[in-house]
Image: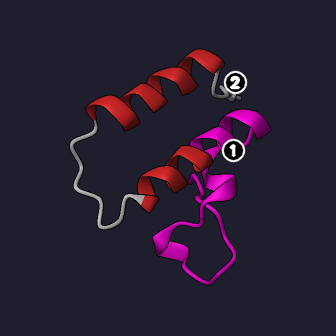
Amino acid sequence: MRKKVLTTDYDFAVLLEQLWKYDDHDYLHERYRVQLNFILLLFTATGARAGAIVESNSYRHSNHALMYK
């Protein structure tokens, strides 16, 4: 079984720097950038994996997270 690696503080700092300094994505509303910041903080603080918090578009309204086959 593969070890599940969680987000570290360093990873979080790098992601935030990318988000606020170097991200050239044109957000429809800047609020989305703030929400993404909160989601990144949530991943780091809880130790959860991305699929455990964000529902995949493939499984919308199914209450299933991302799955590996």
Amino acid carrying label 2: it is Lys
Q: Is residue 65 left or right of residue 59?
A: right
Residue under numbered circle 1: 42
Q: Is residue 47 magenta?
A: yes
Which mark is drawn over residue 27?
A: none
Amino acid carrying label 1: it is Leu
Secondary structure of residue under mark 1: helix
Q: CB of mark 1 within 8 Å of CB of mark 2?
A: no
Q: Residues within 10 Å of mark 2 (few under 14, many from 20)?
A: few
Mark 1 / mark 2, whichever is N-terminal: 2
Q: Residue at x 38, y 35 (%)?
A: 20
Is 2 or 40 nearer to us in this picture?
40
Q: Residue at x 21, y 42 (%)?
A: 24
Taking 69 as reference, is 47 above or below it?
Answer: above
Span highlighted in magenta in the image: 40-69
Considering the image in quadrants, where does the N terminus appear? top right
Q: Is residue 21 left or right of residue 49?
A: left
Q: Is residue 64 magenta?
A: yes
Q: Is residue 57 left or right of residue 47?
A: left
Residue under numbered circle 2: 3
Image position, residue 51 (x, y; %) = 61, 53
Marks 1, 2: nearer the viewer: 1
Secondary structure of residue under mark 2: loop
Measure how far apart labels 1 and 2 are at the Cα level. Answer: 21 Å
Q: Residue at x 44, y 59 (%)?
A: 32
